[in-house]
Amino acid sequence: MSTAMNFSSKSFKPRPPDKGSFPLDHFGECKPFKEIFMKCLRENGYDNSLCRLQSKEYLECRMERQLMAKEPMEKLGYKDLVDTAPQTSEEAKP
């Protein structure tokens, strides 16, 4: 008795990977960001605290291209680097 596997019966819908899962960037979509981040690390003795802006930009690239699940940058430890909305002139008045 043989069992035939038919994979065409189910349709596959791609989705971003779960948090903590980092698939390879096969098309090099974020390679420029990765290279800038790696250069920063090399130039700073691999002290990642000195390359936080570059790592944030790399993660943003991966999220935009669905290479990782979207997360608020604050949850990823970049609260201090997130742009805040500028105050309007009315909000700035005491």
Image (cartoon, grey):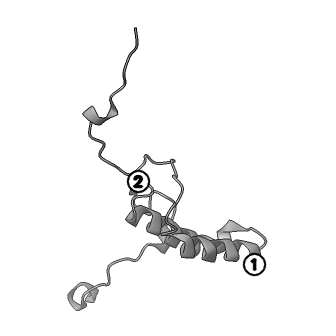
The foreground one among 4 and 34 is 4
Badge 2: residue crowd in 10 Å (few <14, some 14–19, many ≥20): some
Residue corresponding to mark 1: 43
In the rendered view, would you say 60 is above or below 87?
A: above
Question: For residue 39, which quarter of the picture?
Answer: bottom right
- Give the amino acid type for the residue marked by disc 2 in the picture: Ala
Residue 4: x and y in percent read 36, 21
The foreground one among 25 and 81 is 25
Q: Quadrant of the N terminus?
A: top left
* Farthest residue, direction right: 45
Question: Viewed as shown, does residue 75 lie left or right of 10?
Answer: right
Question: For residue 68, which quarter of the picture?
Answer: bottom left
Residue at x 79%, y 71% (from the top left corner): 45
Instruction: Work out how far the residue at label 2 is from the one at label 1, CA to CA, in angstroms.
Output: 29 Å
Question: Viewed as shown, does residue 80 lie left or right of 64?
Answer: right
In the rendered view, would you say 1 is above or below 81?
A: above
Residue at x 40%, y 64% (from the top left corner): 65
Residue at x 37%, y 25% (from the top left corner): 5
Residue at x 67%, y 67% (from the top left corner): 48
Badge 1: residue crowd in 10 Å (few <14, some 14–19, many ≥20): few
* Farthest residue, direction bottom: 89
Residue corresponding to mark 2: 69
- Give the amino acid type for the residue marked by disc 1 in the picture: Glu
In the rendered view, would you say 38 is above or below 24?
A: below
Residue 56: x and y in percent read 52, 69
The foreground one among 45 and 24 is 24
Reading the chain from its start, which is encountered first: label 2 or label 1? 1
Give me the disc on residue 19: none
